[in-house]
Image (tube, grey):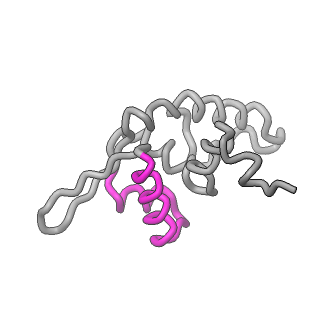
Amino acid sequence: MENFSDKYEKCPMYYAMSILEGKWKWIILWKIYENKVVRYNQLKTILQPIAHKTLTQQLKELESHNIIHREQYNQVPPKVEYSLTAEGETLIPILSLMYQWGKEHRKSGNSGDDAGCSNG
């Protein structure tokens, strides 16, 4: 009997989900998209209550897959900025559709408040 990985590892959907899985990655991408370029501390503040370890790990994974670009400036104090790569920009139509779908399908009592999430 095949296990899940053997059966689906060549599936494009599985590939996309393996790179973008996680509770925070889509929101991180959306916030970087909204801000165009964002510093680490600004992103951490925007994404409260995300833990430092979680944000750092998610950013490293996105960078390793060429979805975001990390620019480090060697100065005191250190400055690090994040932006979307050209490949990351290709996810914006998907993010926009997810935002729209969520807005249209949320339960009626919650439809007026975007709770920190705007439509880029």
Q: Is residue 69 left or right of residue 96?
A: left
Residue 101 position, x and y percent, is: 72, 32
Q: Residue at x 67, y 44 (%)?
A: 14
Residue 62 is one of the magenta-drawn residues: yes
State the image coordinates of residue 36 (x, y, percent, origin top left): 36, 38
- In the orientation shown, which residue stands out farthest toward the front? 1
Q: With respect to residue 108, does 27 lie above or below?
A: below
* Total numbered labels: 0
Residue 104 within the segment the image draws in magenta:
no
Q: Quadrant of residue 77?
A: bottom left
- Residue range (magenta): 38-65
Predominant secondary structure, magenta span:
helix
Report the residue at 63% width, 42% height from top: 114
Q: Residue at the location (40% across, 45% down)?
A: 66
Q: Residue at x 44, y 38 (%)?
A: 33
Whether residue 68 is visible to the viewer of this picture, yes or no, is yes
State the image quarter where residue 78 is shown. Answer: bottom left
Which quadrant of the figure contains the N terminus? bottom right
Residue 12 percent coordinates (x, y): 64, 37
Which residue extends farthest right? 1
In the image, taking residue 39 as reference, residue 100 lies left or right, namely right
Q: Quadrant of residue 118?
A: top right
Looking at the image, is 44 positioned above or below residue 105? below
